[in-house]
Image (cartoon, helix red, strand yellow):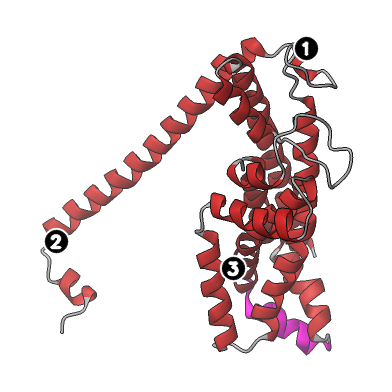
Amino acid sequence: MKTPASLWRGIPLIWHRLLLRILRFAVFAAAGLTALITIFLIGYILVKGIPNLTPSLFAPVYTSENVSLFPALVNTILITALSLLLAVPPGVFAAVYLVEYARRGNRLVRVARIAAETLTGIPSIVYGLFGMLLFVVWLHWGYSLIAGAFTLAVMVLPLIMRTTEEALLSVPDIYREGSFGLGAGRLRTVFHIVLPAAGPGILAGVILSIGRIVGETAALIFTAGTLAKFSGDLFSSARTLSVHIYNLSSEALYLNQAYATAVLLLALVLCINALSSLMAKKLTRGTRDE
């Protein structure tokens, strides 16, 4: 049976070059198309939304006249922080156990990876139905900020675990061997050597999780609710920016305000990504200096 390598060697040189040119063109075309679509979306949102950014949109209390987005902005920050607080520690520690403590090739590791990859591909509306049945109905939390935060934490937990696991696997074994050779134990090696070296990769997973949390709508409609006010406590209904945009656009009366809210949401995501990238660079520089 011929292998792919033997089949490749059997192709004449001229077809090699032609195939490489076609592949190179496909890669550049895909990258260019992606960049053009991104620029178009950002430009369209900015053009439609910036003229509609008015001071009334930042009023502390939402009314049908001002359609303020400020309560939704505060709720978005709160639910993002709470979701990360619930998802990041167990996700990171689970990845540390799978990589550093579980035996290589262990069946538990394979099952955990398959489960995490499967959960990552589940649509968000399924998580919303799960959160509604478990947190809203069964635990009697009602439509609340804490129900939405727990649902989002369950949704991003597999993503954090898998990205952290890949970041830990990318750390060379020579780091661990050097630490063990100097007399450090496994726990000290993990927290002082491996985790700092894998910091940028772990942070990348957290960034992806933040993007998914901030832009989530379907799961929050079924769990956090759509009440447009400040969340007085964790068990009161809360509307985030993405749900706010959905409600405004579905009513077809506040499309201009919906575009303005989209501009703020876009700016928030860009600021988070820029800040996270800066932190990743500092972590990488600090690891190299050490």
Mark sitting earlier along the chain (1/2): 2
Q: How many marks?
A: 3
Residue 91: percent from left, percent from top = 70, 66
Task: Reply above or below: 166 against 188.
Answer: above
Amino acid type, label 1: Pro
Callout 2 secondary element? helix
- Prevalent SS, magenta region: helix
Task: Reply above or below: 225 against 1.
Answer: above
Q: How dense is the environment of label 2, judged by Cα within 10 Å: few (below 14), some, or many (20 and up)?
A: few
Q: CA distance from mark 1 to mark 3?
A: 45 Å
Q: Which residue carries the number 3 mark?
A: 166
Q: CA distance from mark 3 to mark 2?
A: 37 Å
**CB-based contact (under 8 Å), mark 1 and mark 3:** no
Amino acid type, label 2: Leu
Q: CA distance from mark 1 to mark 2?
A: 66 Å
Q: Which residue carries the number 2 mark?
A: 13
Can residue 284 be seen here? no
Q: Which residue carries the number 1 mark?
A: 55
